[in-house]
Amino acid sequence: MRLNDLPISRFSDCNNINELKNNEREKLLLTSQAYQNAVFGFNGENEK
């Protein structure tokens, strides 16, 4: 799909969509870190 094929409204929302994706990525990262801390111990102490 070329950029020109996108509807104007979707193209103008591009920055907002990228911002949302970054926020979701941050939340996922924090969630996975919290999960790993709970399972493996803080700083991966139990991985040794």
Image: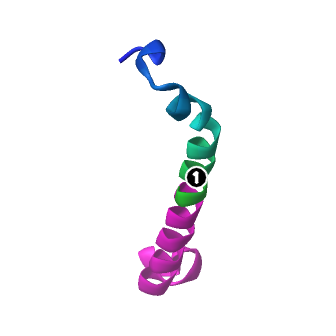
Element type at mark 1? helix
Q: Is residue 22 above or below residue 48?
A: above
Residue 35, above or below 10: below
Residue 17 is left or right of residue 2, and the answer is right
For image coordinates 58% across by 35% down, the residue present is 14
Tell me which segment is drawn in magenta.
Answer: 25-48
Can residue 48 be seen in the rendering of this structure? no
**Magenta segment, principal secondary structure?**
helix
Residue 5 x, y percent position in the rendering: 41, 17
Q: What residue type is labelled 1?
A: Leu
* Residue depicted at 53% across the width and 78% down the height: 34
Locate the N terminus and report the quarter of the image it occupies: top left
Q: In the rendered image of this protein, does residue 3 appear above or below residue 17?
A: above
Q: Nearer the viewer, residue 17 or 7?
A: 7
The residue beneath circle 1 is 20
Indicate how the structure is coloured in the image.
rainbow
Q: Where is residue 30 in the image (x, y as percent from the top left)?
A: 57, 69
Quadrant showing the C terminus: bottom left
Residue 32's spot in the image, x, y percent?
47, 70
Q: Which of 42 and 26 is in front in this view?
A: 26
Crowd class of label 1 (few under 14; some 14 to 19; many from 20; radius 10 Å)? few
Residue 44 included in the magenta stretch of the image? yes
Residue 39, picture quadrant: bottom left
